[in-house]
């Protein structure tokens, strides 16, 4: 618990401020006074002077004025002093309690959220007259503490005091349950609500999206009256699908949103671009970009510019990604990192490193993600010494502590260059347990450089981490075959069958009329599978007849 800060002070008052405080007698007066606080500054010295004058003039007996002062202290980053002022109030009312709880809920201070719970519990002993704002503020604290038991207690209190039919309270209850893993409780609260406004519907849609329950989210969207569905409603579902790896369905919902003439906002467009990037749907991504350009949104939001660059890079058009990058006036670290990542992913390591040099010269400090992209670029180009030097500079020059991804990049860099023993040394020196990606990198390197001993060690670790990944077994089987050890190669394939590991089927995709169709080897579920096979046979016959 915080120690109380002494509120009485002998500081000399700023004369104009002291004169203004003595004239305050109404709510409009306190608002005028708070405006003057902004003019004279809201540093702790000024706030103490103001509070001292409030005590001298007796204004501290007015809970409304004290609440406004508490809010001003909190907004200026002095929540500890605000709490001290609050604790000196002999009879704080509901409004003052609400203000204090809200201020503590927004504070980035140690123990602030726990103190907010203490204030909420003390409220019931002092006034016990909650209003529609009391419970939402308290439920916000529950979310931040992830304390669903406390949330259930507050829910019971809303029922006892008849606030369980308030739209504001119900919305907060749904958000609380959804955030604390009780989405089915959130649905129960929703179902018991007789009159629902758009905020109630959207709260549950967001909850389903957060939990990845997208079938339930889609069903709820269909249930929602069409006149209530707004951009937030659609965005909850689109974002949920995109985050759940169901990019195709995210795009379908986005297209339907446009058909219903609902104008997407920045968040919607970010989700749609993310889905296009994951799906590799360049044609649809370009349509979204045209929409953004037409409304001039990219000039206002750097996040949209970053998303457009990412979409073009992931969809294979790195030239267009560069074109957009060069046209952007405002670039932050994410903009530079996205472009560097795009270049590195396409094997353009030299260009990625040149972009990194431009970034440093522009005075933009790289972050951890930037270094993952740069180290990956060094791998593609084979610049081992530069990669090792950049890895050291992360900590020494930029103060970035390397994580497991950075170590993985260095190990991959060394493995690709054939420095397998050095790669193993880096692995042993890591302050983390090696993950499947790192062992997979070493297995792939051992396959390329014909190091059977390392390959066997890597596979033994991968079997523990990814027992059902057929690719690992196939890499070692191929290494045995390359070395002419056919019996071991056959044994490896037998081992796969023995433990029930199936070789992953090949997959391809094609975009036709803004729709991405995926095909998996041996899959006959496509509705036009017969026509597809007929066309393939016809193509095969034509190839044979032409002697190709």
Image (spheres, grey):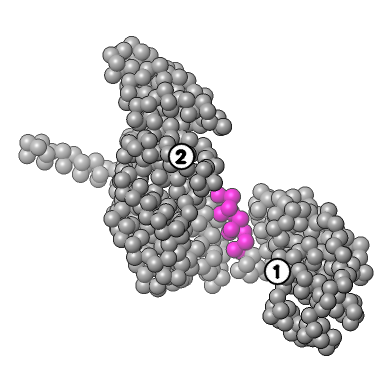
Q: CA distance from mark 1 to mark 2?
A: 40 Å
Q: Does 32 appear above or below 175?
A: below
Q: Position of residue 358 (x, y in %)?
A: 37, 55
Residue 264 in view, yes or no: no
Q: Which residue is mark 1?
A: 76
Marked residue nearer the N-terminal end (1 or 2): 1
Q: Residue furthest top?
A: 487
Q: Position of residue 109 (x, y in %)?
A: 73, 56
Query: Helix or strand or loop: what does disc 2 sit on?
Result: helix
Between residues 398 and 332, which one lies in front from this camera angle? Answer: 398
Could you say which quadrant of the image residue 321 lies in? bottom left
Identified at 47% across, 42% down, the residue is 393
Residue 371 appears in the rendering: yes
Instruction: Name the disc covering residue 351, or none.
Output: none
**Circle count:** 2
In terms of secondary structure, where does tag 1 sit?
loop
Q: Is residue 65 left or right of residue 233?
A: right
Q: Residue at x 81, y 76 (%)?
A: 50
Q: Main secondary structure of the magenta part?
A: helix
User: Residue 119's spot in the image, x, y percent?
Assistant: 83, 60
* Range shown magenta: 201-212
Quick one: label 1, few (<14), some, or many (20+) residues within 10 Å?
some
Labels 1 and 2 touching (C-beta < 8 A): no
Q: Residue at x 38, y 39 (%)?
A: 386
- 322 in the magenta segment: no
Q: Which residue is mark 2?
A: 391
Q: Residue furthest bottom?
A: 23
Q: Residue at x 81, y 75 (%)?
A: 49
Q: Quadrant of residue 411?
A: top left
């Amino acid at each position: 618990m915080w120690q109380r800060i002494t509120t009485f002070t002998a500081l000399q008052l700023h004369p104009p401020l002291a004169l203004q405080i003595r004239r305050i007698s109404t709510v409009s007066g306190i608002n005028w006074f708070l405006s003057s606080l902004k003019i004279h500054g809201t540093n702790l010295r000024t706030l103490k002077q103001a509070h001292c004058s409030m005590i001298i003039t007796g204004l501290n007996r007015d809970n409304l004025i004290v609440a406004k002062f508490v809010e001003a202290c909190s907004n200026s980053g002095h929540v500890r002093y605000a709490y001290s002022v609050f604790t000196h109030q002999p009879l704080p009312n509901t409004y003052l309690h609400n203000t204090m709880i809200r201020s503590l809920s927004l504070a980035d201070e140690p123990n602030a959220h726990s103190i907010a719970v203490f204030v909420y519990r003390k409220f019931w002993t002092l006034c016990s007259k909650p209003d529609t704002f009391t419970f939402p503020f308290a439920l916000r604290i529950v979310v931040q503490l992830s304390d669903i038991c406390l949330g259930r207690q507050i829910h019971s209190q809303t029922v006892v005091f008849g606030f369980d039919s308030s739209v504001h309270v119900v919305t907060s209850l749904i958000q609380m349950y959804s955030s604390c893993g009780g989405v089915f409780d959130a649905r129960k609260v929703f179902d018991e609500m007789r009159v629902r406004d758009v905020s109630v519907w959207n709260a549950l849609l967001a909850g389903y999206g957060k939990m990845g329950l997208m079938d339930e989210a889609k069903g709820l969207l269909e249930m929602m009256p069409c006149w209530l569905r707004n951009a937030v409603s659609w965005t909850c579902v689109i974002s949920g699908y995109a985050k759940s790896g169901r990019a195709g369905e995210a795009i379908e919902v986005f297209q339907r949103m446009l058909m219903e003439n609902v104008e997407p906002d920045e968040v919607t467009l970010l989700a749609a671009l993310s889905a296009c990037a994951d799906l590799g749907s360049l044609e649809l991504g370009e349509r979204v970009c045209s929409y953004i350009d037409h409304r001039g949104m990219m000039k206002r939001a750097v996040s949209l510019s970053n998303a457009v660059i990412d979409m073009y890079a992931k969809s294979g058009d790195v030239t267009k990604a560069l074109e957009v990058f060069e046209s952007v006036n405002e670039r932050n670290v994410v903009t530079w990192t996205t472009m560097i990542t795009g270049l590195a992913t396409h094997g353009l390591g030299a260009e990625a490193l040149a972009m990194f040099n431009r970034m440093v010269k522009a005075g933009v400090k790289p972050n951890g993600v930037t270094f993952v992209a740069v180290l990956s670029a060094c791998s593609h180009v084979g610049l081992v010494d530069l990669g090792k030097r950049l890895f050291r500079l992360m900590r020494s020059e930029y103060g970035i502590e390397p994580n497991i991804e950075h170590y993985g990049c260095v190990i991959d860099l060394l493995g690709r260059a054939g420095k397998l023993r050095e790669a193993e040394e880096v692995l042993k020196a890591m302050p983390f347990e090696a993950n499947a990606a790192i062992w997979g990198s070493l297995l792939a390197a051992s396959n390329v450089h014909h190091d059977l001993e390392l390959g066997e060690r890597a596979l033994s670790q991968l079997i523990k981490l990814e027992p059902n990944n057929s690719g690992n077994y196939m890499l070692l089987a191929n290494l045995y075959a390359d070395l002419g050890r056919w019996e071991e190669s056959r044994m490896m394939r037998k081992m796969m069958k023995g433990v029930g590991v199936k070789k992953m089927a090949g997959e391809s995709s094609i975009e036709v009329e803004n729709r991405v169709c995926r095909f998996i080897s041996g899959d006959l579920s496509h509705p036009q599978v017969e026509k597809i096979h007929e066309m393939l046979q016809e193509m095969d016959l034509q190839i044979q007849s032409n002697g190709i």
